[in-house]
Image: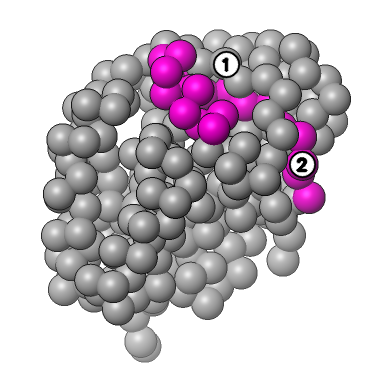
Amino acid sequence: MPEAPALGMIVPRSAVVPNEALTMYPSGVRFLMEAVGLETMTPAGYESVMDRIVPAAQALAGRGAQAIALMGTSVSFYKGAAFNESLVCSIRGATGLPSTTMSTAVVKALRAVGAKRVAVATAYNEEVTGRLRGFLTESGFEVLAASGMGLERIGLAGKISPRELQEFVTGVFRTAPASDALLISCGGFRTLQLIAPLERECGVPVISSMPHALWAGVRLLGLTGAAPGFGTLLSKI
């Protein structure tokens, strides 16, 4: 039997395969990880790891990855849409492999559900949330609301309880009920099990960093990316 295709993931800190990946795709794809040692979700933190991204991509290619995804949404959007695209090009140029970033993935996912006006809930401080607003505006969306939890240290987002996260996200949406989609930004948030309940509560498609970056990454391997039961887009075959 041939080996399943491998998605190489450049991750901020922990090189453990995310639970979301194994839940969404328990078979048919392998996940390879390389961490760049990001400490904080701040511009200074992002700058400190920039020179580690391409070597991490090359290491993944050497280990047999057939596509590369740069995880960590804010590390790719914080300097705007052109910078994000330059990261994709640098990774692809260094490895010869299909490549994406988490920021590219959420834009593709928002477009796939027909979003034009979005409400945005983030883990970040005010400055980084503002930079995401600018990135989304550059990418063609109208941002009706954007609010963050003020988290900076890597790892804190994963400690937010599902109930607290759902209440925060729905609170952001209520400030902009005319939004036609809801974006939850931070790969550290544990959102997979919340997507469908949030869609029922808010009545719009929900896009979230980690699940939809995995969706975009496995699609680079020629797979559908479908993970039925986890919201509008992931349920599409």
Q: Is residue 47 left or right of residue 115?
A: left
Q: Is residue 204 left or right of residue 109?
A: right
Q: Kindly identify which residue carries mark 1.
A: 147
Question: CA gap, disc 1 to disc 2?
Answer: 18 Å
In the displayed structure, would residue 83 be above or below residue 79? below
Q: Kindly identify which residue carries mark 2.
A: 116
Is residue 134 something that shows in the picture? yes
Is residue 200 something that shows in the picture? no
**Which label belongs to residue 42?**
none
Numbered range of the magenta stretch: 114-134
- Residue at 34% from the left image edge and 75% from the top image edge: 97
Q: Secondary structure at mark 1?
A: strand
Local packing at callout 1 (Cα closer than 10 Å; few below 14, some 14-19, many 20+) is: many
x, y percent for residue 199 = 76, 33
Q: Quadrant of the N terminus?
A: bottom left
Type of amino acid at the residue the image marks with label 2:
Lys
